Image (spheres, helix red, strand yellow):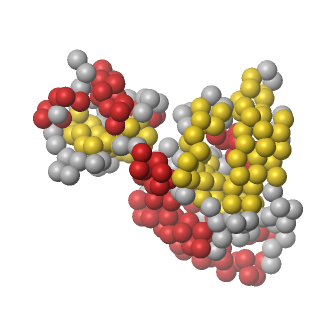
Amino acid sequence: MDTILELKHVKKNFKKKEVLKDISFTLHAGEILAITGSNGTGKSTLLRMIAGILTPTEGEIITPKSIKKGFVPDQFPSLRFNAENYLTYMARISGLNEKTTQLKISEWLKLFGLYSVRKQKMEHFSKGMLQKVNMIQGLIEQPDLLILDEPWSGLDVTTLKDWQQVMKQLKKENCTMILTSHQKELLDATADRIIVLEDGKVISDKSNESIRNETNFATIKISKHASSIEKLKKISGVLYVEERNNHIHLVIESNQSNPILSALMKQQYTILSFQNDNDTGNESSIHDNEQYISN
C-alpha cells in the first residue's frame, strides 16, 4: 500500500506554548483518517501543517512531490464573489482547464443544491451554504489528499448524506482523506482509522473497527435548553451532540454515563431517555433507569 503522508516527531510551538508534541503517524493511499480530541488539543493546527499553511517547529511532514492537496478549513468567509465566479477563479489560479473545470463546478453546485443561487454573492449565504462552497473548492483540483477541518459543521441532513456518498466515491478513486470532527455517528460511517489527541499528543491510534469492538456507547435524549450546545460538547465523555426537532440527542461513552447524567441534571436539563447501544430493547425513560444516575 502506497504511503501518501508521513509525520515524523512533529512539534509545533506558538511563542512559548507547545501546542503539538512529538506527533508521528503514517497515512496510506485511499485511507480515511479521523483526528479527534477535545477543543484546544491541536487538531486544526495539525491539519494546517499537513496542508502546508503552517510549518512545524520540529520534525518532518513527508508527502510525494507530485501530490495534489485539497484543504477545507473549519471557517469559510462570506466573500463578495458569487459562488460560480469564486470557484472558477480558484480553478484558474490552480492552473486547471477552465472549460473542463466549469462542467465539474456545475456538477458540484447541483449536487449540493447551490446551482440555482450560483450567481448570488456569498456574503448573503447562510453558514451551511458557505460550507458547501468551502467543500467544493477543496475538491476542484481532484486532490490525492483531501484535508477537512470539521467538514460537516452547519450542513443539513440531506447534504450530510450526499457528502457521505461523495466520500465513498472519492475513496473508490483512491483519494486519501484526513479530517477532524466531533460527530461520532458520522465518523463511524466514514473513517477507517481514528487518532485521538490529548494535550497535544497522540494517545490512541486504532482502526474504527477495533474501537467499535472495544468501546460501548450510549445515547441520551434531553430537553432543549437555553444553554449553548457547545457547553454540552465540552463535557468529558460526550462524543456527539445534535439538536433535533423537539430535543437534543447525545452520544456518550457508556463508562462515563453517571457523571454525564449528573452534569446534565445540574445544568437543569430534563433527561427524556437513556439507552446503551448494546441494549436489545427499545430506549426507555430515564425514570426506569435510575441505576445510571449517581446520587
> Which corner quadrant holds the C terminus?
top left
The residue that appears at 81% across and 69% down in the rendered structure is: 92
The residue that appears at 66% across and 62% down in the rendered structure is: 176
> Which corner quadrant holds the N terminus?
bottom right
The number of numbered badges drawn on the structure is 0
Q: Nearer the viewer, residue 7 or 230?
A: 7
The residue that appears at 72% across and 42% down in the rendered structure is: 24
- Does 262 appear above or below 168? above
The answer to whether residue 37 shows anywhere in this view is yes
* 17 left or right of 187 in image: right
Q: Residue furthest left?
A: 288
The answer to whether residue 126 shows anywhere in this view is no
Q: Position of residue 200 (x, y in %)?
A: 66, 31
Q: Residue furthest right?
A: 65
Q: Quadrant of residue 60?
A: top right
Q: Quadrant of residue 94?
A: bottom right
Q: Position of residue 34 (x, y in %)?
A: 58, 50
- Does 200 appear above or below 280? above
* 141 left or right of 207 in image: right
* 97 left or right of 40 in image: right
- Does 183 appear above or below 22? below
Q: Quadrant of residue 161?
A: bottom left
Q: Position of residue 78 (x, y in %)?
A: 64, 51
